[in-house]
Each structure stands twice: as C-alpha cells, then as structure tokens.
Image (cartoon, rainbow, N blue to C red):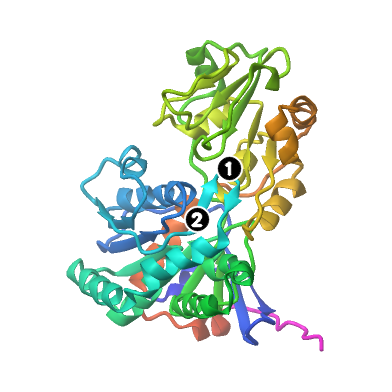
Amino acid sequence: MNFARQFAGTPISFSNNNNNGFYKKKLKIGDGYRISASSKHLVFAYYVTGHGFGHATRVVEVARHLVSAGHDVHVVTAAPEFVFTSVIQSRRLYIRKVLLDCGAVQADALTVDRVASLEKYSQIAVAPRASILATEVKWLNSINADLVVSDVVPVACRAAADAGIPSVCVTNFSWDFIYSEYVMAAGYRHHSVIWQIAEDYSHCKFLLRLPGYCPMPAFRDVIDVPLIVRGLRKSRNEVRRELGIGNDVNLAIFNFGGQPAGWKLKKEFLPDGWLCLVCGAKENQDLPPNFIRLAKDVYTPDMIAASDCMIGKIGYGTVSEALAYKIPFVFVHRDYFNEEPFLRNLLECYQGGVEMPIKDMFSGYWAPHLQNAINLKPSYEGGTNGGVVVARVIQDIAIAKSYAPTKIKLEYPFVLPQIHN
C-alpha cells in the first residue's frame, strides 16, 4: 500500500528547523477523517508516560477507535487500569503495567522538583536501560506488533527500532524539552539524559503533533492533527439535573488532577450564588456546603461541559477540554513546566483563559477572577476529533510499513522555505 495516497489532496509545507539544520515536513490533516474496519488485522503497542492522567485519557480516545476497527491494542503504562477499561470493554484491549518513565516529580499540583525529576528518570530509565531494551524487544516480538505508538515514552522508540518495528509519537511536548530547563538546577551531570531522550525520539517515523505544541527538535517528520478530546456522554441539563443544580446557578469545577495535600477549601472562597464541583477530593476531606465532592470515577468531560468555568492548572487535558466545550478556564501558574506557555497561548488566543495569581488562590480571593471568566466568550472552532484522526493515520502507517518520505515530495506540490541568514 502506498501510504502517501492516503493523504490525497492534503497540503504539505516545509519549514526550516533551526535547532538541527534539517527540513521538517508537516502534513496538515483535516476533520474529514474517519476510520473503518480494516481488511488487515493489526497489533499496536501503545506506550503511555507515567506522568498524570492527561496522557492516558487521550490515549483512550485513540485506542477505542483502533479497537472498534478490529485491531488489538496493548497499552503499556503505569496509569490506573480503570482509566482504560472504564471506556473500552473489549478483549482486544490489553493492559501491561510497566513504568518506563516518570515525567515530572511534583510535591503537589503546582510544585515541580527539578532535581528529583531527573534523578528519578535516571533511576527508572537510564540505569536499567540495557535490561529495559532487551525486555521490550522480546515482548514486542512476542505480540507480533505492527506499530509502536508512544505518548510520549522515549525508550519505546528505541526499543521499536531494535525490534525492527516502526514507531510514531503522539504528543504536544517531548521530555527532552521539558527536562532541558531542569538541568540548570540539577547540574551538568544530568545533561546526557537530555541527549539520550532526544536520541530515543529520533528513531520514530513521525510525530503526530497536537495543538499547543512545544518545540520538539528531535522529530523531523511531523503530521499536525486536531485536538484529542473525550466526547460527552450526557448533556449539560442531564448532569445538572442529576446533581440537583439549576441552570440559573453559577457552577465552577475545581480540577487539579487530584486534590493537593494541605489545600483547604473554604465557603467564602466562592461568591454568593456559586457552587463548585471538586475533582479528586479525598473521602475524609471536609468540604464546605457550597463545594460538591465528585466520585473518583466520575466522567470528568461531562462535569466540565456542565460548568460555567473551570479552576485548575494548565495541562493538555484541561486546556483541550476547556477549549472543546467552550468553558472559560481560571488557571494558576505552575513553575518549571515548559509545556505551560504554549498551551496558555492556545487558550488565550481563543479568549478561553484567565490567570488567578497563586496568592489569590490560597487566600480565597476568587470572586473577581470567576467574574472575569464568565464574561469571556471562548471561540475555539478547531477540530476536536483528534482521536479518530490519529487512529486512522497510525492504522495507515502500520499497513504501509515501507513508506518513504521521498514519495510525498514526488506526489504533492510543495514550496521550499525561504532561509534567512
């Protein structure tokens, strides 16, 4: 199969990547993509980073389309199994619990320990590297994987190359970019970790790049895809009716990916007439009467879409769902996470965000920020069907293993970039 023909009519542009001196190819995929049952049964090994739930929830969206098309998906992750099995009930989904990276080590939702992050990554992925590669190569061959997909575990790309299997990454950031800032605090001895991560990523065939992306110089071939967003199961009215909340009530959702230890919510934090849904609150945590504890396994997108604004930290999951459902986002800045400025730009470009200074967050001076938020009119009109788009693209890549970038240059018009000295 000629993979390039799958993108008939798709414009291709080239941009100069000044970080590594190579030309970076971009394919822009529109919203018209669909995935249907393939005549060929495929096996995907999908590696998911151990950092937070955001990566796992977007992987679920891709995996469920692959499973529905008749393919087997083996998810390799340290994330809780219920994140996947609560959405996909199929014998074609396999969960393998393995920790192959650690992301950013955080003391709480807003505090990143830069030195500990690099030291833990070295402990998990660098020291046992030879053993990891040997284990992963053996496992990939044992399941007869057709394609390795990574979001965005570095060593998975190298393991795939060693096993002779193509790989792709699906992400809006890469860990070499995030960790590069940490080296300033951790010292030169961790500098080699950054280069190792970048070298691992360089083995993948494509980066399927999500909106709000950071610079990712380790990847040469790039396909831009829409936001991957979980779809809604219930309407705003249904959710509010089940919660016993009228449509005339201003409703916020407090979403920090788990209630941080030591944070105490008080009744006076909310203006009169407001209620707030709380994600991740511990069962023994006392909440004021105007704060409502949500169940651990609640389907968060429905809760977000039923709210008038969200309070939280910037991450791909929160930003993408706020944009998709046009819910204003009151965000608190997080230091030492290089992903934030790029997602913030995306959020603010579509009039979707208001910053709450951290001192106001802790002191309970929420009212002016909530008022500013509900006066916004979020305007994101971009694609939100990235789950099905990515599933279709990686299905085609898996079928067309012999794809060569030069074919695209021959079959589609392109314009060489102007290079400025």
Quarter of the figure with the C terminus: bottom right
User: In the image, what residue occupies the spot 52% across and 45% down?
Assistant: 229
User: In the image, what residue occupies the spot 64% across and 60% down?
Assistant: 338
Q: Which amino acid type is marked by label 2?
A: Val
356 shown above or below 387: above
Image: magenta residue range: 412-421
Q: Is residue 71 visible?
A: no
What is the quadrant of residue 38 in the picture? bottom left
Residue found at the very far left of the displayed protein: 142
Which class describes the residues within 10 Å of circle 1: few (<14), some (14-19), or many (20+)? many
- In magenta segment, residue 286: no
The image position of residue 200, as x and y in percent, is 44, 77
User: In the image, what residue occupies the spot 57% across and 54% down?
Assistant: 112
The image position of residue 178, as x and y in percent, is 58, 65
Spatial separation of the CA atoms under disc 1 and disc 2: 19 Å
> Which is in the foreground here, disc 1 or disc 2?
2
245 shown above or below 195: above
Q: Which amino acid type is marked by label 1?
A: Thr
Which class describes the residues within 10 Å of circle 2: few (<14), some (14-19), or many (20+)? some
Quarter of the figure with the N terminus: bottom left
The total of numbered circles placed on residues is 2
Q: Are marks 1 and 2 in contact (CB under 8 Å)?
A: no
Q: Earlier in the sequence, mark 1 or mark 2?
A: 2
64 shown above or below 218: above
Residue under label 2: 105
Q: Is residue 45 visible?
A: yes
Q: Main secondary structure of the magenta part?
A: loop
Residue under label 1: 318
The image position of residue 174, as x and y in percent, is 54, 66
129 shown above or below 326: below
What is the quadrant of residue 395 in the picture? bottom left
Nearer-the-camera pick, 405 or 310: 310
